[in-house]
Amino acid sequence: MPRLSDKSLLAIAAVVDVALHARGTPVAAKALAARHDLPPRHLEPVLQALVHAGVLKGVRGPRGGYELARERRRITVAEVVRVVEAEAEEALDNFPPIVRDVVQPAVAEAERTFDAALEAVTVEELCRKAGQADGRRSLPDGIDFTI
């Protein structure tokens, strides 16, 4: 069964947290880390990778932090995972021939199926589920940004 890395799960949670808490004010990495009981140094490289990929937008200054770079309905879990996993990928040349020639091609189709399933999950959907779990009222359907 394909399994997401802890770093990918952390990145997804960070994007959802920013989507939930950045309503007109950027979310500071320090506040995000405190909410999830993480040292900021673990979170900052993930957030920066997401900024470089255009998922998040970094806001500088004393009241700076992170906000979504676009509407949450336009950000998929697969996109967040690709950003994080791209940094961790090793070249197949470093693996023994059995892995490169037999195992990896056999697993590739399952990975494509898993990626397609993640592509169907948006940050909007996760925010909605988080709102239901917290008993909070989420935004009405179709509204996923602030002005």
Image: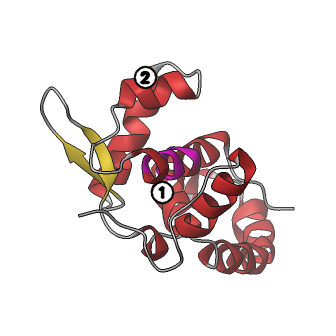
Q: Which colour scheme is used?
A: secondary structure
Please give left or right for residue 121 compared with residue 105 in the image.
left
Height in image: 123 above or below 31?
A: below
Residue 90 in sight here: no
Snapshot quadrant of residue 96: bottom right
Q: Do the residues labelled 1 and 2 touch (CB within 8 Å)?
A: no
Please give left or right for residue 41 compared with residue 106 in the image.
left
Tag nearer the camera, 1 or 2: 2
State the residue position of label 2.
40
**Residue appearing at x 27%, y 50% in the figure:** 24
**Residue appearing at x 32%, y 43% in the figure:** 48
| Residue 100 position in % (x across, y down) | 69, 65
Q: Which of 21 and 3 is in front in this view?
A: 21
* Residue type, numbered disc 1: Ala
State the residue position of label 1.
86
Query: Is residue 15 within the magenta segment?
Result: yes
Q: Over which residues does the magenta segment extend? A: 13-18
- Few, some or many residues within 10 Å of mark 2 (<14, 14–19, 20+): some
Q: Which of 39 and 81 is in front in this view?
A: 39
* Residue type, numbered disc 2: Pro
Q: Distance between the residues labelled 1 and 2?
A: 21 Å
| Residue 122 position in % (x across, y down) | 57, 71
**Residue appearing at x 12%, y 31% in the figure:** 61
User: Which part of the image, by quadrant, shows the C terminus?
Assistant: bottom left
